[in-house]
Image: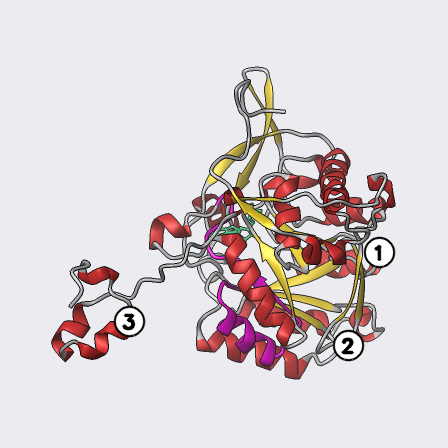
Amino acid sequence: MSRRPLYLLPRVCLKAETKQRCEVIMRIEEDVKLDFKDVLIRPKRSTLGSRKEVDISRTYKFKWSGREYNGVPIIAANMDGVGTFAMAKAFKADGNGLSVALVKHYDIGDLIAYYEQNGNDNVWYSIGVGDKDVEKLDAFLESKIHKTGKGIDKLCIDVANGYSQPFTEFVRRMRDKLPDVTIMAGNVVTGEMVEELVLSGADVVKVGIGPGSVCTTRKMTGVGYPQLSAVIECADAAHGLKGLVCADGGCTVPGDLSKAFGGGADFVMLGGMLAGHDQSEMEVVDVDGEKYVQFYGMSSGTAMDKHAGGVAEYRASEGKTVRVPYRGSVETSLQDILGGVRSSCTYVGAVTLKELSKRTTFVRVTQQLNNVFGTEG
Ligand code: 5GP
């Protein structure tokens, strides 16, 4: 009999144990799971001359809706200060085909007006699973704009914990109700649940529990999964069923997006990296001569206060409220982000973003950056 401490015994050893001892032994997965910070992408010899030669847009045909998507597969998160009408307009003007998951707290009248004036090509209509969300969605589906075919064509069904049976049933109901609407649903972090959601009607499964910049799930619940490993494992599961995944949360620098795409993500969703801009539709405050914009998790106290009652059902765990430096218009940040991803592609010889995952080999590291002169810049 092994002398290793009981908690390290692999599950198979338990067969030899008495029933009573089995009950006290925990299950521990021993293989290391990785976050973006734990790896770098290994460069590869290539014939690419410059990043201008790289195309970082993707074309997808969605499994269930049958619709096509073409554009840079980056989505602004449905968070206050990020998933705004102003952000959607800026992305449209930018012309690279990025999209925005609209904040779900927008008023129905404002949502309809937005679709009437700007079209639906780069926005996802967001809902939780609450009765109010469904009533608002139904009202939109009855609107004139929706009946002309220019209404909701992309739906983001978003809950903190995508593991519950009622959530899967909700996704299935939406799929039955809206057969030609592209559905993105989440969040989950493991392959078996990705499969369940794809089979229930999700075209895209959103992956990420706990990695977000203003998320406190891991602190409050101890639940989560390192984001890069979650993306790698979930992408594998989804692709096997012709589904797609969206890596949601945890990107702090452009290189993190490249790692997510390199790990197999079909879309990447950004919150914090897009906060603090003119497009946030937030007040810019002056603190000791420096300009800041407030940013908060959608289940933070701040969000609860603002949306009175509409938030508790949406996010089980709390979020943080922070101040981010004001960064002007989002165009400059977009250039940085897209430039970074293009550059990653040149380092590994990927002419298109699609090739990035095929050409990515991750190297595990113990250090990422040299911060001898600070962490800014
Ligand atoms: P970020 O890009 O800022 O790291 O992560 C954005 C993601 O964090 C969002 O798309 C959403 O999935 C998640 N998120 C937003 N607000 C909250 C919150 O209050 N609590 C939790 N647990 N996650 C949140």
**Where is residue 63 shown, x and y percent of the image?**
71, 76
**Depth order, front residue of 58/364:** 364
**Where is residue 341 shown, x and y percent of the image?**
72, 44
In the depicted structure, whether residue 92 falls above or below residue 16: above
In the depicted structure, whether residue 1 falls above or below residue 256: below
Amino acid type at circle 1 is: Gln
* Residue that label 3 marks: 11
Q: Quadrant of the C terminus?
A: top right
350 with respect to 275 (left or right) = right
Q: Which residues are magenta?
A: 188-214
Residue placed farthest to the top in the image?
289
Amino acid type at circle 3 is: Arg
| Label 1 element class | helix
* Residue that label 1 marks: 117
Name the N-terminal-most of marks 2 and 1. Answer: 2
Q: CA distance from mark 2 to mark 1?
A: 25 Å
Is residue 205 magenta-colored? yes
- The local crowd at label 3, few if under 14, some if 14 to 19, many if 20 or more residues have their Cα within 10 Å, is some
16 with respect to 58 (left or right) = left
